[in-house]
């Protein structure tokens, strides 16, 4: 994979006072995101953690250009986001591979959309299928694969476009713990050396710290940045080993102290809504 | 606003995989045999009682009877009908139905999918489309005879309007129900409008469209026959109309029977198409009946 360098500006992502409001049936707009300031450098891996349903994913939809911001500015590679910016890759929480295309055609999709010929797209797709460990499964349809294998397809599908900015929205949330750790390792392996900036949204602290250079803690909704914790653990990291080190445990406590309050606020709200 | 009327539900017609255990399979095959036997018995009982009643109680002049209908069919297929060769008659009706079906399906899919993705246009057009759908379209057959004459085009037009609405509403609904994540993912991967339509929206709406096509071919046949009935120089509808004019009940029944067979063959073909186009789908978990 080629080294991607960002020549457009100093930051891969720059959010300034980014706010997102959604209209609701009652007429009162619902604020998902409020005054978010965040910079992500090229090649940096940032995890975003926050209480469930606080609006973490909304950050990604603003950056990807799928949703416009209601206020504030969103810039990718120095240019304000008005449509889907070039070089963005996005892995969704839900299955986003096309169920009516086999693995090969699914992985080749991005190249085909970008105008590559069938032969060339298939050749590069085969290469990526091997890289994510799915060689021999080219002809299978998604329903014939396990959840973890479908995630590998999604990963190859996203990475084949060689994104310089990778957005991941709880991509491994639906997987069992063992598969999830395996996929985290795979992600780190495939990401290292690409120079791509990564924003990884999760509510799993261990996952967030294991992968990232920085962990951003969000407040209970409407979400804004509460705290930023630098993760100075050495790379390359081995997922199942790193979480047992004392440095990791200290960082975990540090992030959890910050997050706990927000989780409690969310819980109280949930409880009062139930009562 | 909603255009979601007259929508056929998606039916998964793929059979469940047979269980390999042999006693169970033997039991299933005995069940199938019994099902067929009871079906044959029902037909025999129905036709037998009709024949018997026509020979004793009711007047076969009005109600005809199975043996007369059979004789009629034999005459039509060996000597030809009042319109000449029965095969030629069938070919004309079939051509009208197939043309109306093809054009109606094409137009219905195109307009349905486009409107399904263009919310504003759909909102604007909704009352007009609902209004057009509320017109008793069979009456249009009379208008089409005036417009297009006694030839084939007036029947194709009648079949077209019947097919169009059946397919349109399903294609419309199918295009609306596309999973948003699939669309977002394709857009991020670089899909333009046309690529998105071709690779995501259309395949996703396919099972809805196919479901409507089952009914649509029946509608196309109805359209062709009603068109011929209203005014034509050849076709099955005309044959049935002539039989009516001659108080030939057996002829009406025979025409009906031929039409039914045509519809069943078409239904089988569409099912084959459906199986081919949806081979990517996981096998259905269960199917209660062949309906």
Image (cartoon, rainbow, N blue to C red):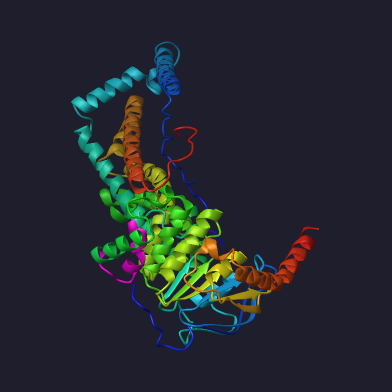
Picture coordinates of residue B151 (x, y %)?
25, 49
What residue is drawn where x is 51% and y is 77%?
A: A63
**Furthest residue toward top:** B56
Quarter of the image with the C terminus of chain A is bottom right
Picture coordinates of residue B27 (x, y %)?
45, 20
Picture coordinates of residue A237 (x, y %)?
49, 68
Which is nearer the eye, B184 or A59?
A59
The answer to whether one can see residue B13 in this image is: yes
Q: Quadrant of residue B223?
A: top left
What residue is drawn where x is 33% and y is 41%?
A: B272
What residue is drawn where x is 43% and y is 67%?
A: A189
Quarter of the image with the N terminus of chain A is bottom left
> Eyeballing the image, is A231 above or below B80?
below
Which is nearer the eye, B177 or A148?
A148
The answer to whether one can see residue B138 in this image is: no
Picture coordinates of residue B20 (x, y %)?
41, 28
Which is nearer the eye, B50 or A28?
A28
> Eyeballing the image, is A71 above or below B49?
below
Which is nearer the eye, A100 or A202?
A202
What residue is drawn where x is 28% and y is 52%?
A: B153
* B101 in the magenta segment: no
Q: Main secondary structure of the magenta part?
A: helix
On screen, residue A19 versus residue B164, left or right, reads right
User: What span is colored magenta in the figure?
Assistant: A104-118
The total number of labels drawn is: 0
């Amino acid at each position: 994979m080629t080294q991607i360098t960002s020549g457009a500006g100093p930051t891969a992502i720059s959010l300034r006072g980014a706010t997102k409001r959604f209209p609701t049936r009652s007429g009162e707009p619902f604020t998902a995101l409020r005054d978010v300031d965040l910079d992500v450098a090229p090649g940096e891996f940032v995890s975003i953690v926050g209480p469930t349903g606080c609006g973490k994913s909304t950050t990604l939809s603003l950056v990807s250009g799928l949703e416009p911001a209601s206020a504030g500015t969103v810039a990718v590679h120095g240019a304000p986001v008005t449509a889907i910016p070039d070089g963005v890759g996005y892995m969704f929480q839900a299955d986003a591979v096309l169920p009516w295309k086999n693995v090969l055609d699914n992985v080749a999709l991005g190249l085909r959309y970008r105008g590559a010929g069938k032969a060339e797209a298939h050749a590069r797709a085969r290469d990526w299928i091997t890289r994510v460990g799915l060689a021999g499964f080219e002809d299978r349809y998604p329903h014939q694969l396990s959840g973890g294998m479908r995630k590998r397809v999604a990963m190859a599908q996203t990475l084949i476009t060689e994104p310089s900015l990778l957005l991941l929205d709880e991509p491994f949330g639906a997987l069992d713990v063992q598969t999830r750790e395996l996929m985290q390792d795979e992600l780190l392996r495939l990401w290292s050396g690409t120079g791509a900036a990564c924003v990884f949204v999760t509510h799993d602290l261990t996952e967030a710290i294991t992968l990232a250079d920085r962990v951003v803690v969000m407040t209970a909704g409407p979400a804004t940045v509460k705290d930023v914790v630098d993760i100075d653990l050495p790379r390359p990291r081995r997922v199942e080993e790193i979480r047992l080190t004392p440095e990791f445990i200290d960082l975990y406590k540090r992030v959890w102290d910050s997050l706990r309050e927000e989780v409690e606020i969310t819980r109280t709200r949930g409880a009062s809504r139930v009562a | 606003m909603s255009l979601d009327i007259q929508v056929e539900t998606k039916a998964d017609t793929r059979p469940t995989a047979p269980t390999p255990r042999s006693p169970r399979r033997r039991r299933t095959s005995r069940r199938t045999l019994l099902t067929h036997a009871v079906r044959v018995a029902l037909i025999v009982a129905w036709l037998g009682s009709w024949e018997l009643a026509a020979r004793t109680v009711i007047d076969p002049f009005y109600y005809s009877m199975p043996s007369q209908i059979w004789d009629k069919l034999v005459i039509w297929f060996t000597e030809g009908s009042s319109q000449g060769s029965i095969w030629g008659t069938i070919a004309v009706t079939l051509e009208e139905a197939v043309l109306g079906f093809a054009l109606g399906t094409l137009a219905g899919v195109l307009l349905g999918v486009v409107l399904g993705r263009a919310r504003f246009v759909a909102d604007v057009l909704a009352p007009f489309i609902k209004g057009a759908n509320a017109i008793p379209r069979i009456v249009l057959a009379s208008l089409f005879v005036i417009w297009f004459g006694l030839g084939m085009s007036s029947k194709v037009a009648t079949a077209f309007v019947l097919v169009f609405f059946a397919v349109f509403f399903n294609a419309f609904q199918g295009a609306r129900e596309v999973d948003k994540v699939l669309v977002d993912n394709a857009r991020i991967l670089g899909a333009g409008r046309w690529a998105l339509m071709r690779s995501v929206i259309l395949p996703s709406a396919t099972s809805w469209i196919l479901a409507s096509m089952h009914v649509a071919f029946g509608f196309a046949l109805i359209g062709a026959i009603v068109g011929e009935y209203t005014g034509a120089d050849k076709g099955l509808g005309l044959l049935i109309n002539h039989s009516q004019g001659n108080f030939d009940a057996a002829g009406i029944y025979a025409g009906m029977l031929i039409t039914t067979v045509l519809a069943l063959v078409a239904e089988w073909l569409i099912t084959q198409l459906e199986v081919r186009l949806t081979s990517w789908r996981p096998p259905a978990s269960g199917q209660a009946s062949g309906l």
